[in-house]
């Protein structure tokens, strides 16, 4: 198989966490803040979800809608992220924060958002462009780390080739099934990232859920015994972490046994690592490779997101 540009972007993904962002209008950054509101859509919301995990003791909210939530205070630091710089909802959030005179910063690769920050002298980080937005998570996250003074990565060690081969093998086993990604609450972002990678890159449905909540509702959905039901339609991808609460680990193990007893497949992916950055990069890159090979095996070009672009084009029509 020839190695296309998208393939190279996946291979280079860990290098994004070595990037050192430059903050324009740095003097406009707040010295203190009570809470953090991260506004972004699609892949640009993912850095906020990861920051929630990294800085679990802080009050962090991810906003994926127009304008701003009603329950914020004057000491809420608003960071808007749009890879293209042209996302309608994110620009709306930026303008609302500006109107309310809230502490504000922006992250983009250009577009209308960059123009607004230049006009308003707002704190701004420009991320590298010309890569797939969903693969630019590392750049956007490092920009967020710089703006919030979150802990930076140290001792990154990722076996890229092994991850690719393991993901390629799992993609073969999944075949045409719909994957459901299950994880603990502390690894919720990793399961959600895997879900949207599958949607955008493999062009297929995928879902996610978290323990222990899923044991109180979704578990019962596996009690499907109609003779016409196809047991190959779904496959569980369980993201396990040795640092998870022992009670959660036990629930994961019991859940896997019950689902397998019903005739469904459960595949376990170990994301354990004492280094938070290594765990995140490992998991995100693995599920990136997984979605890539699900597309390749199905004869699908993983790069374009044609339906999303068509939708955005229709929105621009007046």
Image (cartoon, rainbow, N blue to C red):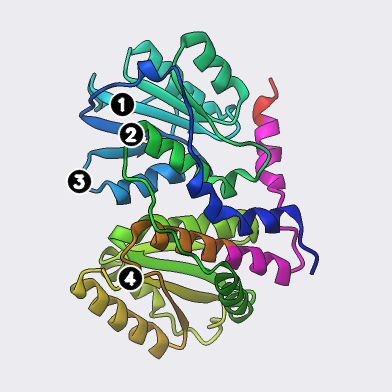
Task: Determine whether the residue tagged by mark 1 lies in a helix, strand or loop.
Answer: strand
Q: Residue at x 69, y 59 (%)?
A: 7
Image location of residue 162, percent across then percent down: 56, 74
Measured in 3D between alpha carbons, the distance from the residue under mark 1 to the one under mark 3, in whole angstroms, is 16 Å
Q: Residue at x 69, y 31 (%)?
A: 314
Question: Of 28 and 95, which appears nearest the observer?
Answer: 28
Work out whether mark 1 precedes mark 4 in sequence or the reverse, and give the earlier one.
1
Question: Of 22 and 13, which appears nearest the observer?
Answer: 22
Relative side of 159 to 47, left or right = right
Image location of residue 159, percent across then percent down: 52, 69
Quarter the N terminus occupies: bottom right
**Residue underneath mark 1:** 77
Circles 2 and 1: CB atoms closer than 8 Å: yes
Relative side of 186 to 206, left or right = left
Measured in 3D between alpha carbons, the distance from the residue under mark 4 to the one under mark 3, in whole angstroms, is 20 Å
Task: Determine whether the residue tagged by mark 3 lies in a helix, strand or loop.
Answer: loop
**Magenta stretch?**
289-314
Measured in 3D between alpha carbons, the distance from the residue under mark 3 to the one under mark 2, in whole angstroms, is 14 Å
Residue 148: mark in rendering: 2
Q: Residue at x 30, y 76 (%)?
A: 252
Measured in 3D between alpha carbons, the distance from the residue under mark 2 to the one under mark 1, in whole angstroms, is 9 Å
Image location of residue 142, percent across then percent down: 45, 41
Quarter the C terminus occupies: top right
Relative side of 105 to 54, left or right = right
Task: Determine whether the residue tagged by mark 2 lies in a helix, strand or loop.
Answer: helix
Residue 57: mark in rendering: 3
Q: Quadrant of residue 228?
A: bottom right
């Amino acid at each position: 198989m020839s190695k296309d540009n998208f393939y190279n972007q996946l291979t280079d993904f860990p290098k994004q966490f070595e990037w050192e962002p430059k903050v324009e209008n740095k003097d406009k950054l707040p010295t203190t803040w009570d809470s953090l509101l991260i506004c972004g859509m699609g892949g640009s919301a993912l850095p906020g979800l990861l920051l929630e995990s990294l800085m679990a003791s802080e009050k962090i909210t991810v906003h994926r809608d127009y304008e701003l939530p009603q329950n914020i205070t004057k000491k809420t630091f608003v960071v808007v992220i749009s890879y293209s710089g042209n996302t309608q909802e994110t620009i709306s959030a930026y303008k609302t924060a500006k109107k309310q005179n809230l502490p504000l910063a922006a992250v983009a690769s250009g577009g209308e958002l960059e123009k607004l920050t230049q006009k308003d002298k707002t704190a701004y980080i420009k991320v590298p462009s010309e890569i797939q937005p969903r693969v630019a998570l590392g750049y956007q996250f490092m920009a967020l780390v710089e703006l919030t003074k979150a802990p930076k990565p140290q001792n990154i060690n990722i076996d890229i080739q092994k991850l690719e081969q393991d993901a390629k093998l799992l993609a073969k086993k999944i075949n045409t099934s719909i994957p459901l990604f299950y994880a603990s609450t502390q690894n919720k972002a990793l399961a959600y990232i895997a879900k949207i990678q599958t949607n955008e890159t493999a062009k297929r449905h995928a879902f996610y859920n978290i323990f222990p909540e899923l044991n109180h509702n979704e578990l019962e959905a596996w009690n499907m015994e109609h003779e016409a039901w196809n047991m190959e339609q779904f496959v569980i991808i369980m993201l396990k972490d040795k640092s998870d609460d022992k009670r959660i680990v036990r629930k994961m193990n019991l859940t896997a046994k019950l689902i397998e007893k019903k005739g469904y497949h459960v595949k376990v992916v170990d994301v354990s690592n004492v280094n938070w950055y290594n765990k995140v990069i490992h998991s995100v890159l693995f599920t990136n490779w997984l979605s890539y090979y699900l597309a390749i095996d199905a004869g699908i070009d993983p790069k374009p997101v044609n339906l999303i672009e068509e939708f955005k084009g229709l929105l621009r029509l007046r």
